[in-house]
Image (spheres, grey):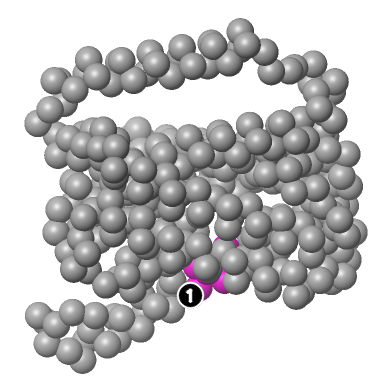
Amino acid sequence: MNRKKWKLGLKILATVAALAVVVIFVDFRKAAKGLAQADMLWFAGSILVLMLSIVPQSIRWRGMLRRPDIPLRKFAYFLFMGYFLNLFIPSQVGSDLVRSTAFGKRHGEVGLNIAVALAQRVIGLGLLLLFAAAGWWFYGGSIAGKIGWSLSAGKIATAAGLTILVIIAAWLARDRWRKSPVFLGLWDSLTDPSLVGWAIVHSFTIQVLTSVSTWMLFRAVFPSPDFWQITLFNSIVQVALLLPLSVGGVGVRDVLNLALYSGLGGMPTEKIVTVGLLGYSSLIFLALMGGSWMGFRAIVGRNQPASSED
C-alpha cells in the first residue's frame, strides 16, 4: 500500500472513530426531535448570509490575482466548485488547491493561483485567531476557571516570538525555493502592503459574515445564543479543520463542537448535534448548487464551439 493510500486509510479511520464517539455520547432521537423543532427562517437566513460571503471572496480573489479583466461570476463559479469539492477532499486547504489549479488551467497562471489561495489561507488564519481573541476577551472569562488558563503578557510574548521565528525561517528559506512559482507568488502576495491590506479588509468582511451565519444557525435551535461564545469556539473549530484530520472534516468537527459547546459551554449535547446537522445541511445545499452549476456548464459546453467561454 502506497503512502497516499495509508493517509486516506488513516483519515477514514479517524472519521469513523470520531463519529463513534458522537454516537456513544449523543441521543440521536432527541437530536432529530430538535431538528424538527428548529426555526427554519433563521436556518434559511444563515444560508443566505453564507452565500452572500461569496461576493467578497470573489472580489478578494480577483484583486489578489490582479485580474480585473475576469468577471466576478467566474470566480464565484469556482468558489461554488470548492463547496462541492469539500464533500470529497479531506481538508479545506486541499479543496482550495484543486479549485485554484482548475481556475489556473482555465484562465492561466496555475502557480500564481495556488500561491494566492495559500496567501488567502494565511491571512484568513490570522483573522481567525483575531476573532478567537475577541471571543476570548468577551466570553473567555466564563470558562477560564474550567480550563485553568488565562492570557498573560508572557504567553502573548511567546506567541509573538514563535510567529517572528516562522517569518524569519521563511525569509531564510526563500533562496532555496526562489525558482518555485508558487513560493514566489506566495511571497510576493504576503510582502505587498497594498495587496495584504486589500486582502485583510475583504477577509475581515468574510469572517464577519461567517460568524453571523454561524450565530444564526445556533439561533435556529437556541433562543438566545451568545455571539462571542460562538465566535470563539467556531474560530477554534475552523482552524482545526484546515488540517486534513478526517474525510471532509466529518466527525472531527462534531467531536470538537461537543467538547467546546457542551464540555466547556454547558450546552445540551443533543442540541449541539442538531446545530451540526443543520450546518451540514447548509454545506450540502451549497455543494449541490456548485455541482448543479458545474453540470449546467458541462451541458452548455457540449453545445458550444470548443473556443467559447462560459
Tell me: residue 162, above or below residue 117: above
Determine the image quadrant of residue 100. Answer: bottom left
82 w.r.t. 245: above or below: below
Residue 247 is situated, as x and y percent measured from the top left of the image, at 52, 47
Rendered location of residue 94, percent (x, y): 38, 46
Nearest to the observer: residue 52 or residue 31: 52
Q: Position of residue 106 (x, y in %)?
A: 18, 65
Q: Identify the residue at image location x=60%, y=71%.
A: 48
Asked whether, in this view, residue 183 is left or right of residue 143, the answer is: left
Question: As drawn, is 127 to the left or to the right of 280?
Answer: left
Majority secondary structure in the magenta region: helix
Where does the N terminus fall, quadrant-wise?
top left
Q: Is residue 274 above or below residue 157?
A: below
**For numbered disc 1, what is the local secondary structure?**
helix
The residue identified by callout 1 is 289
Residue 223: horizontal and vertical position, in percent? Answer: 88, 60
Classify residue 286 as left or right of residue 20: left
**Magenta region, residue range:** 283-288
Per the image, is 286 magenta?
Answer: yes
Between 305 and 44, the one nearer to me in the picture:
44
**Which of the 4 image quadrants contains residue 232?**
top right
Type of the residue with mark 1: Met
Residue 162 forms part of the magenta stretch: no
